[in-house]
Amino acid sequence: MRGGIDLGGTKIQAVVVDDDSKVLAQARVPTPTDGGPADVSEAMAGALRTAAHEAGTGTAQLNGVGVGSPGAVDEEDGTVSSARNLPGWEGTFALGKDLGGRLGTAVKLGNDVQVATDAEFQLGAAREFDSVLGVFWGTGVGGGIVLDGRPWVGRGAAGEIGHVVVRRGGAQCPCGRRGCMEAYAGRGAMEAYARRRQARGEHTVLFDIMRKRGRERLTSGVWARALRAEDPMAVSIVARAIRALGAGVASAQNLLDVEAVIIGGGLGVRLGEPYAARIAAAMQPHLFLNMQPPTVRLAALGDLGGAVGAALLAA
Amino acid sequence: MRGGIDLGGTKIQAVVVDDDSKVLAQARVPTPTDGGPADVSEAMAGALRTAAHEAGTGTAQLNGVGVGSPGAVDEEDGTVSSARNLPGWEGTFALGKDLGGRLGTAVKLGNDVQVATDAEFQLGAAREFDSVLGVFWGTGVGGGIVLDGRPWVGRGAAGEIGHVVVRRGGAQCPCGRRGCMEAYAGRGAMEAYARRRQARGEHTVLFDIMRKRGRERLTSGVWARALRAEDPMAVSIVARAIRALGAGVASAQNLLDVEAVIIGGGLGVRLGEPYAARIAAAMQPHLFLNMQPPTVRLAALGDLGGAVGAALLAA
């Protein structure tokens, strides 16, 4: 048995898997919003302890644990730097060593988006392909790349598909730049845009649904419900996001010419197949080889893909 | 000795190189504008015969010949399909076999932009790097990719950086789509834009220079001269091209995170270092890792890079 932990800005997802990567148990806890890296590490350990207990074992008995982390991950040193969505994590923290101490087993780190892509490549929707682009549509838009069966990470920061420019001089992106795909398609930017449109007097049920469901943010579930209610603002903002995804993912495809594009992420998984098909359609007018588009599929591992992919690091 | 031929839409460049890829002789002829693939093949053979003669040998004595070709190149079959810039070449032509027959030696084919990138990687400006993006700024804008020391060609069509979208819904591209980088930065699109601005009554010396130099097109030399004369229209159109290159190449870098970007192509080589530096500066506001930009360099092999790279195919 191995453990896998997907460390997100909102939640920590832990799984315990068997040697075939089958999920035996899982646990989810909210990511601490204050404190520092050690508090996050303890919350991660807690989630994995719960999952291990449910799988009838202890964390020290696991054959290693993998972690998919945001920020700049140094796989060799086992450190994570500049994880700006996590509390007090502007600097460098030796997460591998710290968490390994708490769990009593070896911990390996990887980039969160890359491990989720590897999971889809090895176990999920992209199993029959050799070259894959993973597009993770959530708060931001992350990308993972597999070429010739191997992850491509560049100098460590490849796959920033959210920051492919789709409109030079366009909308302000949470990253501070302008016209990035994420400025239109990231759930964070979509919420900011919805708030601006509401402040200008435009009606929407988005924030009513948010409050009714006890949320402080427009979660993927809130967007899904507003779309189901055919809320005009939600429909128009999602359509705008899909146009940006179409241009940005097609640009990536024109450059990489991969066999398959896998659509995952909180919003991607929640909105599901019909929206993956809409992204594929929105790519079409921008594809250089428009007669040979890549296969576009929804991520098969859903919400657990990141944690299952992290567990692959310990395989 | 080996031969290399760069087959372009305007000219055919042939070289004969020694075992260290040193150029012993070279010859250049215009690409036939009518006839068909066999006529182009004969013109290629003629150019290489001239170069071989100058190198004191015959083409049948060469240890193979490589060709960098536009269109869809099938390296294994030795065929080129859909080379739309070449006369009567909409279909598939067995260029390897045909040209090999004319030359009396084996012919290997590769994609024109990819062989030029490989040449810069193996012999030119990118020798000390393992991952390289070649950007060939000419009539169109082509891209070549080397990752981990190996060319990345995707399903055969990777590297179409000219068709990365920099402005969704933007300018019409020669490819028929909208907002591609090439719609702003390709010399073909730049000329069309200059003609439209002149037709609207705007003054420029571009077409005067063109006529004085006996050209029918705004060649790279014409643009260089107009820039030297500080022609306002030329300055503004080149600045617009550089803004598009900045956004498009930075997008590619955000995705690939390579060590080096090499700027080549007719216009890139002609305008030289100061303009490569301007492209690097224009990338900066769009780079996700703006503190760790890639090294941006001018192609070191200049005009002969494509032919020298083609000769590597026969090495």
Image: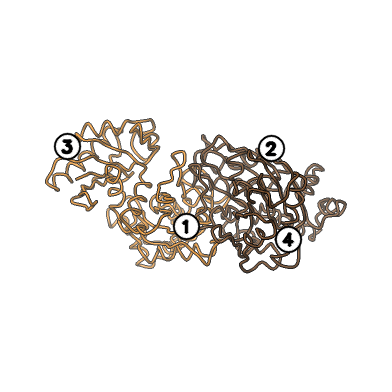
Chain colours: A brown, B orange
4 or 2: tag closer to the N-terminus: 4
Q: Residue B56 in the image: x percent, y percent? A: 11, 46
Specify the farthest residue to the right.
A212
What's the chain of the residue with tag 3?
A: B
Amino acid at circle 1 = Leu
Give the foreground label among 4 and 2. Answer: 4
Secondary structure beneath label 3: helix
Residue nearer the viewer, B35 or B27 = B27
Q: Tally the marks.
A: 4
State which quarter of the image contains the N terminus of chain B: top left
Hey, which quadrant is residue B67 in on the image? top left
Residue A42, which numbered label? Answer: 4
Residue nearer the viewer, B256 or B171 = B256
Q: Name the residue tied to disc 3.
A: B60
Specify the farthest residue to the front.
A61
What's the chain of the residue with tag 2?
A: A
Secondary structure beneath label 1: helix
Give the foreground label among 1 and 4. Answer: 4
Give the foreground label among 1 and 3. Answer: 3
Amino acid at circle 2 = Glu
Secondary structure beneath label 4: helix
Amino acid at circle 3 = Ala
Q: Residue B291 in the image: x percent, y percent? A: 52, 67
Give the foreground label among 4 and 3. Answer: 4
Q: Name the residue tied to disc 2.
A: A273
What's the chain of the residue with tag 1?
A: B
1 or 3: tag closer to the N-terminus: 3
The residue at 62%/54% (across/down) is A106
Q: Name the residue tied to disc 1.
A: B245
The residue at 60%/49% (across/down) is A314
